Image: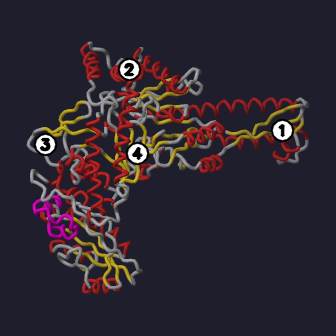
Amino acid sequence: MNRSQEQADRFFGQLMSTVGLDVEYRAAEGDELALVTADGGEVPVLDLIGGFGSLILGHHHPEVVAHVRAFLDQRRPVYAQFARNDDAQRVTELLNTVLRREFGFEDDGYAAVFGNSGAEGVEIALKHAELDRVFRIGALGEQLAGNLAAAGAAVASGDAVLSPAARALAGTRADGEAGAFAALTAVTAEHNAAQLAKPPVFFALEGGFHGKLVGSLGMTHNPLFRGPFQALGPTARFFPVDDPAALRALVDAERASVLDVVVADGVVDVHERPAPVFAGLFLEPIQGEAGIRPLTAEQARALQEVCREIDCPIIVDEIQSGAGRTGTFFASARIGLRGDYYVLSKSLGGGIAKTSVTLVRTSRYRKEFEALHSSTFAKDGFSTSVALKVLELLEADDGRAYRLAAERGAKLFDALERVRKDFPDVIADVRGSGLLLGVEFHDQSAGASALISGKSAAGQLGFVIAGYLLTAHRLRLMPTGSSPNTLRVQPSINVTDAHVDRLETGLRAVCEILGAQDALHLVHPVVAGGRAAPRDDVRRLAPRQRPTDPAERTVSLVAAVSSAEALRRFDPSLADLDDQALEDYLTLLAPARALPPMPPIRCGSVDVVVFPFFASRHDLGADVAGVVGDLAAVLHGARTAGLTAISLDRDLGAVAGAVGLTAFPGLALDVVDADLVAVLTGAAAL
């Protein structure tokens, strides 16, 4: 079955096929995957993604596998709800032991709530933090009611009178203290009810990622993920981590206060007290999807200071950074960031089980939460047993796994830094900690290669690089979700010097390609089909000439690239690829036919902005409806840039007439001459 017939992630799978990432893996062990080849064979691939941080011990760690086999052979219960789970208790105890060691505290520690995934762990923290706030509101309400009753009794007995400020707030000229107190009671009750009914305020960092469930998505910054669902649940107030003043400004804007009526020394007065509106601050000690961006100790101190002042709990998302990946079990321990909540998942399952644990500081824990939140599959016998085994392996030999993570991570970092220093115009930064590293590539949207620049402008550069590294070097990496030019590097603690050398070799190769803008080497591995590359050398593409003086006029053109020859003209670096390879590539591009507009081409005094549109001969014959639909979407967007003409093959020329545009059958993208400009400007004048 081909991708066009599949129903499971069909469109995303088709997109991955455009860069060579739509592959199947048959087996896995350690840091290697067995990729299934076209002839049914296998080739080994070095997995440097590590299950997006889920494989600190690697694929199928032998002791974890043996433990799982023994668990099943012993027929231990997986689902026996409302029964004691000693493994869950032991996991909680071990995590508290680690917390005390790494943070140096002596208090009662943390209670644990188990879940099924990292996103669910965030939901648990979100719900518990709100429940805690609700209980704090209830306690405050009881205090206010008690103080008001005491003041009322004192006024009724004649033992107290209202202060001038209290009488002014009451806003009454009624005779006697009783009438004034009744008015004061009504005013404060109305004010307090409104303040205590305010929705919770959550804070989160710009760039943060905490999951894609309804609640966790509200704490995730990327509007691409959050925007369509924003009305469904709570949304955090986001701020940049390097600007503490921004957080304080948000705090000042969201403050709430209640009026407390108290009696002292025979005088009834009104005091303003803060209301518990702040429910929690979500953060990652290393922002993973934002491009592997670590928080600093200074930033952590600033955030903790503000949160202490307003009694706002700190919820530390260690889903990706925890379980020893940075050289300590908790990455937050490295910057002195102690949270009120910790969320753990990913590697805690040993690469086999799906589990999460949300730790809640005992001083904040609400026992009522256990009756209000539940999950059929959470805290099951299997996942808690695996989690316990993983913790024991990480803690074994006085924490040897943590030392390995730090040592192997330093080795990786040094290799990545060497590449960056040798290719500073290609790699912008290398950052991270331990075995959670990111390699950020410079934006390539102004490069000489139309294909590379177009993919970069479309936010696909990281996937193009990942596809090349997989197909040409058998290295598995992926970009981060909200920083598409950054590749994540997250292998297990078993990564070897030979693995590091392979990664360095692959990155040097891709840097040479991007530096020279030679797209041939990015395209050929994806469509090779066993064919040898037409050339092995990397050739520098001549830079495009950019107009420096302003144009008298700008016009736009949508041009179809629907043949091998047109693709060669579109990007001259592809010239040496044969027709079959280029036709195959055009077919692969069907799920992503459109790229952002190319930089202006100057003709005389007019700038022509070309919108490339890929449509293979196969598409034109087998999927005309799909091509027309995709083209319509491009036309809709391109009109805002002053679209005046469209270049199409004859079969689709009718589309141009339907939208009132001039069609130029089969026009090449590089053919922008005076005759064309005259027609384009004439069409624009209509």
**Residue located beneath label 1 in the image:** 269
Residue 586 percent coordinates (x, y): 18, 61
Asked which secondary structure carries label 2, the reply is helix
Q: Along the polypeptide, which appears first: circle 1 or circle 4?
A: 1
Of the two numbered discs 1 and 4 in the rendering, the one whose residue sits closer to the viewer: 4
Assess whether residue 566 is covered by the magenta stretch: yes
Q: CA distance from mark 3 to mark 2?
A: 37 Å
Mark 3 residue crowding within 10 angstroms, few (<14) / some (14–19) / many (20+): few
Residue 289: give its label.
4
Amino acid type, residue under disc 3 in the picture: Thr
Mark 2 residue crowding within 10 angstroms, few (<14) / some (14–19) / many (20+): many
Q: CA distance from mark 1 to mark 4?
A: 52 Å
Residue 384: give its label.
none
Q: Which residues are magenta?
A: 562-587
Amino acid type, residue under disc 4 in the picture: Glu
**Residue located beneath label 2 in the image:** 388
Side (left or right) of 202 relative to 538: right
Residue 37: give its label.
3
